[in-house]
Structure formats: structure tokens, C-alpha cells
Image: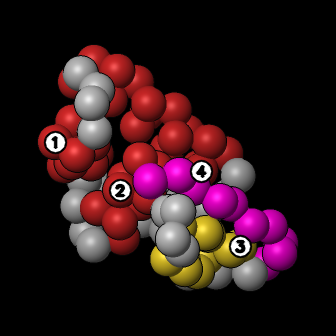
């Protein structure tokens, strides 16, 4: 499944990960390197499975944990209005 960001959300790369800004609410979201990997995959048109693969490949985490973490991140981003439903 592919996820998309609302058009009112901008992303800025930082030394530590990325920052998302919801231009509508003014709310910032500082994402660590793992979450930044997921967001980059999605921004570039990837899907959840690709994001999980990227996390497993880049970090010392097993697939089950990566799936749980990616699912939780996406749920949080959706609940905060960053991701389109």
C-alpha cells in the first residue's frame, strides 16, 4: 500500500533525520533517522513493504520489529494529519 503526504506538509532534511512541518497547523515533527528512512521511501513513491525493507537493511532490527515500528509511525502520522487517509 502506498501512502501520500498531505500537500500542506513540508519536509526538511537535518543532520539527525528530518523535520516535517504541517503548514496548516504550524506543528513540527522531528523524526529520528529510522523514521526519516520511512518518510523518504514514502515521499519517493515507495510503499509500506519497501519502507520495512529499507529499515531492516539500514538498521539492526528484525523484520517483525520493523513492521511494528513502521505501522506505529504511520498510524501516528495519519492521526496527526500528516498522511492522507
* Callout 1 secondary element: helix
Question: Label 2, on which residue?
Answer: 37
Question: Label 3, on which residue?
Answer: 22
The outermost residue toward the front is: 15
- Residue in the image at 52% along x and 41% along y: 73
Who is closer to the viewer here, 2 or 66? Answer: 66
Mark 4 near mark 3, Cβ–Cβ under 8 Å? no
Mark 1 near mark 2, Cβ–Cβ under 8 Å? no
Image label count: 4
Who is closer to the viewer here, 73 or 1? Answer: 73
- Label whose residue precedes the other's in the sequence (2 or 3): 3
Question: Is residue 32 inside the magenta stretch?
Answer: yes
Question: Label 1, on which residue?
Answer: 57
* Callout 3 secondary element: strand
- Label whose residue precedes the other's in the sequence (1 or 2): 2
Q: Residues within 10 Å of mark 2 (few under 14, many from 20)?
A: some
Q: Is residue 55 above or below residue 12?
A: above
- Label whose residue precedes the other's in the sequence (4 or 1): 1
Q: Residues within 10 Å of mark 3 (few under 14, many from 20)?
A: some
Please provide percent x and percent y for residue 70: 40, 37
Q: What stretch is highlighted in magenta?
A: 24-33
**Rendered image: mark on residue 77:** 4
- Residue in the image at 83% along x and 72% along y: 25
- Label whose residue precedes the other's in the sequence (1 or 3): 3
Measure how far apart labels 4 and 1 are at the Cα level.
23 Å
Measure how far apart labels 1 and 3 are at the Cα level.
29 Å
Mark 2 near mark 3, Cβ–Cβ under 8 Å? no
Amino acid at each position: 500500500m502506498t501512502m501520500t503526504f498531505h500537500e500542506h506538509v513540508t519536509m526538511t532534511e537535518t543532520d539527525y533525520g528530518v523535520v516535517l512541518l504541517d503548514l496548516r497547523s504550524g506543528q513540527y515533527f522531528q523524526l529520528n533517522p529510522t523514521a526519516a528512512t520511512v518518510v523518504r521511501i514514502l515521499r519517493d513513491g515507495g510503499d509500506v513493504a519497501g519502507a520495512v525493507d529499507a529499515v531492516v537493511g539500514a538498521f539492526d532490527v528484525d523484520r517483525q520489529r520493523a513492521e511494528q515500528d513502521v505501522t506505529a509511525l504511520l498510524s501516528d502520522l495519519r492521526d496527526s494529519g500528516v498522511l492522507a487517509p
